[in-house]
Amino acid sequence: MTGIYLAKKSSTLLDIVVTAALLLLLGFITYRVSVGLNYHWDWSIIPNYLLRWDEEQGRWVGNILLDGFFTTIRLSIWSILLGSGIGLVMGILRTQKRLIFQLIGRSYVELIRNIPPLVLVFIFYFFVSDQLMLMLGVDDFIRSRTETTARWIAIFVAPPDFFTAFVSGVFTVALFQGAYIAEIVRAGIQSIEREQWEASAALGLTWLQQMCFIILPQAARRVLPPLANEFINTIKYSSIVSVISIQELTFQGMQIMSSTQRTIEVWLTISFMYLLLCFSVSLFARRLELRMAESSL
């Protein structure tokens, strides 16, 4: 009992020391920014870019910073969904015995992982915008929709004027993250014991039934933590599409910074908004992991 008490006491003391050190470091950074850099804080501009009063509607509406936050959410959700689908297919192909399937999966993973995401952004932006979208007539189709349809498209995807750039950004982020998700899926499938395959085959299940009902449910429990990490990375990597003028959070932050010269306030606010979004995903993934662990007992 004495040993346990001393261990708890030393742990508490260590927590206090670490917390004090972090507070001192934060205070030193604040001092250097305020005094050393002769920086004058002005947080009063931030609320003005979060909300504004709309005279026509007679109510408060989101301003460009909040609009950029919602654009980041939409961009991240579509990228996660598309990237997960691509990663799942490519991860399964990587586990197949036929050489052609392995070549397809491995070529995709190695190609995407060894090309900088910024290069992918420009490649897909100019290809999707100038070639594929134009050939399919997507822009004309979107702009010809009714006002109600255009409003719903703007809510769930992007405004018609930015639809092509938004789709390009989604494809870029999804393809980039899909390569990493594919490796997670491959590792999860290959971690399932061979006896599971043999037992399910003995029951007369087809390969598709084995994968859907036996292998993937077990692999999902094992790959959930790294998958959650990749979903969080998807949210953070979405900021790179600001270079093609998608009006997400980082792009709007740069616009505000250039017009107000309030560098630190703007980027601290944006960092907090990204933290809020990523931490929410982390909490959701943790709860899902615990629920899946309880259901397997």
Image (cartoon, rainbow, N blue to C red):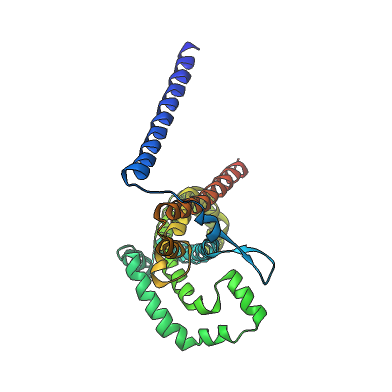
Q: Residue at position x 39%, y 75% from top?
A: 124
Q: Residue at position x 50%, y 87% from top?
A: 137
Viewer-nearest residue: 271 or 78? 271
- Image vertical order of residue 91 relative to residue 35, above or below: below
Q: Position of residue 291 (x, y in %)?
A: 61, 45
Quadrant showing the C terminus? top right
- The tally of labels here is 0
- Image vertical order of residue 270 relative to residue 10, above or below: below
Viewer-nearest residue: 279 or 51? 51
Work out which residue is located at the far right of the displayed protein and give it.
58
Q: Position of residue 171 (x, y in %)?
A: 45, 71
Work out which residue is located at the far left of the displayed protein and give it.
114
Q: Position of residue 110 (x, y in %)?
A: 32, 64
Q: Residue at position x 40%, y 84% from top?
A: 130
Work out which residue is located at the far top of the displayed protein and give it.
2
Residue 267 shown left or right of residue 57 in the figure: left
Q: Residue at position x 50%, y 56% from top?
A: 45
- Is residue 90 shown to the viewer in this render? no
Viewer-nearest residue: 70 or 11? 70
- Is residue 14 shown to the viewer in this render? yes
Q: Position of residue 254 (x, y in %)?
A: 41, 63
Residue 56 shown left or right of residue 270 in the figure: right
